[in-house]
Image (tube, rainbow, N blue to C red):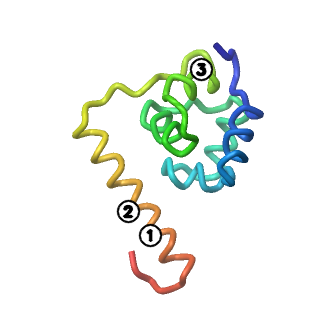
Amino acid sequence: MALFFDAQWFDARLAERGLNRRILAAAAGMSEADLALAYKDQRELSADEVGVFAEVLGVTPAEVARSAGVSTPTPGAGPEARIAALEQRVAVLEAELARLRGDGRG
C-alpha cells in the first residue's frame, strides 16, 4: 500500500492509454488544480473519484486506492449511485466539449 500518492504510477497508466492529467481530472469532475493537489498529497480522492480513475486507467478501484495513499477510500456505492455519478460526469464532459467548441450548447 502506498503511503503517499504515487504520481509516477498514475502518469504511467495515463501514458499507456495515451491520456493526460487534464483528461483524468475532467472525467472525475475535478478541476486540474484539485488533481494537482491530489498528486502533491494535499487532497484525498473521494470513493467516486477512485471509481472514475479506475475506469479511465483500466485498473481496479483497489489498485487506484492503493496507489493514491493510505486513507483513500474504495468505492462501495450501489448501482443506482454509480449510474447517477456516470450521468453527472457525462454532463460535465458534454459541457466542457460545448465550451471548447464555443457553441454554447450544454
Q: Nearer the viewer, residue 82 or 14?
A: 14
* Residue 67 drawn at (x, y percent): 64, 24
- Displayed quadrant of residue 89: bottom left
What's under tag 1, amino acid-wise?
Ala
Residue at mark 3: 66
Label 3, secondary structure: give it: helix
Q: Say which quadrant the C terminus sits in.
A: bottom left
Q: Nearer the viewer, residue 8 or 47?
A: 8
Left/right placement of residue 40 relative to residue 86 reads: right
Q: Residue at x 67, y 17 (%)?
A: 2
Q: CA distance from mark 3 to mark 2?
A: 29 Å
Which is more N-terminal, label 1 or label 3?
A: 3
Q: CA distance from mark 3 to mark 1?
A: 31 Å
Numbered circle sitting on residue 95: 1
Label 2, secondary structure: give it: helix
Can you say whether 67 is above or below 96 in the image?
Answer: above
What's under tag 3, amino acid-wise?
Arg
Which is more N-terminal, label 2 or label 3?
A: 3
Residue at mark 2: 91
> Mark 3–mark 1 contact, CB under 8 Å?
no
Left/right placement of residue 23 relative to residue 50 reads: right
Label 1, secondary structure: give it: helix
Q: Residue at x 72, y 47 (%)?
A: 15
What's under tag 2, amino acid-wise?
Ala
Left/right placement of residue 94 relative to residue 76 reads: right
- Count residues near mark 2 (Cα–Cα under 10 Å), then give few for <14, some for 14-19, many for 20+: some
